[in-house]
Image (cartoon, grey):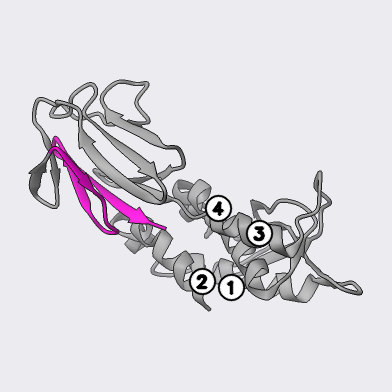
Amino acid sequence: MPNLRDFERRLGGLVEGLFSKTFRSGVQPVEIAKRVVREMDDAKQVAINEVWAPNRFEISLSEDDAPRFQQMESALVTELKQVVLETAAERGWGLVGAPEVELFIGHSLRKGDLEVEATLVQGEQKVPPAAVAEAAEAGHHGELLVREADSVRRILLDKEMVTIGRLPESDVTIDDKGVSRRHAQIRTKDGRSTLTDLGSTNGTKLNGQQVQSRPLSDGDRITVGTTVIEYRRV
């Protein structure tokens, strides 16, 4: 299923390094996405001219599995909501409200067990199939994977201008002595992102080459100081 392949690709950068060992056993992220899709199908309601799919998903993990997801919970929830939108759009289903996803600990579950409860929760307004397709498309953003020591931060490029630097007010704050206070910026317009150095002391590299301003492509690696930031188009 295309949307599940996209789900795996988008989360792939977060399941590297530290997470590659963490996810060798127990519940895998894609298993959760598959169960969400299955529960959407099982719990959908067929009206005369429309099909309404569940929009709220309560996901229970065992006490052994739940801690492994803590560092990526926010990203996982975001991506699962996108899976809900993409699945509904792909099958022509509507939603009775915006997607909602919550993770819980199931104290009676064993390692590797997974429970997903899907329900239809009325939102402020229903999201008919045409609007679902628009919402699914709007959910696609560029993103940055900031690799630091034993962790990876995921930052969506969900606004036109994103700044990178040591200043706390930067959109991407980097604690790296080689990074300037206002080091670089990424501007996204009409679906294209462009990296621009802001006169930094040590410069900005793109795939190992010093650059002043350059359009970004999926998989590009930006280096500021000693920190590597990977650009993903999702």
Residue at position x 81%, y 43% in the image:
124
**Marks 3 and 2, how far apart at CA:** 20 Å
**For the residues carrying marks 4 and 2, which lies nearer the camera in this image?**
4
Instruction: Give the residue furthest to the front.
Output: 190
Dot 4: element: helix
Instruction: Give the residue furthest to the bottom.
Output: 1
Dot 2: element: helix
* Amino acid type for the residue under numbered disc 1: Lys
- Mark on residue 138? 4
- Dots 1, 4 in contact, CB < 8 A: no
* Amino acid type for the residue under numbered disc 3: Ser
* Amino acid type for the residue under numbered disc 4: Ala
Residue at position x 45%, y 37% in the image:
159
Q: Nearer the viewer, residue 57 or 92?
A: 92
- Mark on residue 34? 1
- Dots 2, 1 in contact, CB < 8 A: yes
* Amino acid type for the residue under numbered disc 2: Leu
